[in-house]
Image: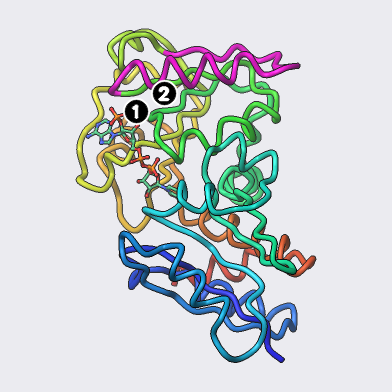
Amino acid sequence: MTDRYAVFGNPIGHSKSPRIHALFAAQTGQDISYEAILAPPDGFAASIDAFLAAKGGPARGANVTVPFKEEAFRLATRRTARAEAAGAVNTLSFDAGAIIGDNTDGAGLIRDLKNNVGCDPAGRRILLLGAGGAARGVILPLLLENPAELLIANRTEETAARLALEFARLPGCAVDVKPDGTGFAGLDGRQFDLVINATSAGLGNAVLPLPTSVFAPHCVAYEMFYGRETAFMAQARAAGARVGDGLGMLVEQAAEAFFVWRGVRPHTAPVLAAIKA
Ligand code: NDP
């Protein structure tokens, strides 16, 4: 019997996950099906129940995207440490009545930075823009890479301050984790080796009020949004930074979920190339 998987979101029509997982399955010879399911805004848990009860092969797992990641966190009967740190779940595994919640977004970012973008976060001065779900999900994985510092800047400063305090208090955290303290205004004159845009400003192509100085010589600017050039990417390019977008993170977080479910790690480079094409 073919093991069943799906991605749940709203909207979901645009999702590249079914194609990515079909390519992973073909490459690794895994017998799985993977579909995209549109869950109603107030019907995420019911949609998961229906998926579990549907006829066919056993339901083994699910990916979860906007706006259900926090609800998936609450639905899980057990959670991994990285899901706990992220406060959100993007990967569910179904195992004999248990629902295990995981978060592979951070691992996806780190793998993309190291393997595709060619930027190892170790020892770098990192500026993280944004303090929403995506930012929260990548803070612990970034800290585990031992950057020189991690500064969090957000339009709403209190959210950045709360996040920085929470992660700076982690036992064993040797990294200087700080909020910028001014919601972007205090960045003038500061320099970073890696600037990650985890705001959703790219959606509306809003320009972030960033001073050019934040992009140090040889800086890498990483836009988590993908699909088109954003104002942030243009701003970073103009300042001389090397620019990457979030498509690689999307493929890498999917590969991590595939590994969690199947115990096999697919090669991501050909899949990333196929999705880009
Ligand atoms: P959230 O809604 O949780 O957070 C949005 C963040 O963006 C907040 O910090 C918000 O600031 C900030 N923001 C929104 N609009 C503006 C603006 N005009 N100017 C400045 N700041 C702004 O979203 P997520 O964290 O879930 O997603 C953020 C981005 O990451 C999205 O573009 C998403 O597509 C991308 N993403 C990519 C992934 C990938 O695999 N490539 C995976 C997950 C996310 P404030 O607190 O002030 O409201």
What amino acid is found at the position of numbered circle 2 in the picture? Phe
**Toward the viewer: 151 or 164?**
164
Mark 2 vs ligand 1: CB under 8 Å? Answer: no
Label 2 vs label 1, nearer the camera = 2
In this rendering, the answer to whether 44 lies above or below 78 is: below
| Residue 170 sits inside the magenta stretch | yes
Upstream in sequence: badge 2 or badge 1: 2
What span is colored magenta in the figure? 155-179
Residue picked out by circle 1? 239
Rate crowding at label 1 as few (under 14), some (14 to 19) or many (20 or more) other CA atoms within 10 Å. some
Compared across the picture, whether 108 is left or right of 128 comes to: right
Residue displayed at 74% across by 83% down: 29
The numbered dot on residue 16 is: none
Taking the spot 65% from the left edge, 47% from the top edge, the residue there is 111
Q: Nearer the viewer, residue 82 or 266?
A: 82
Say which quadrant the C terminus sits in.
Answer: bottom left
- Determine if the magenta segment contains residue 238: no
Residue 180's x, y, as percent? 40, 12
Seen in the picture, residue 195 relative to 58 is either above or below; the reply is above
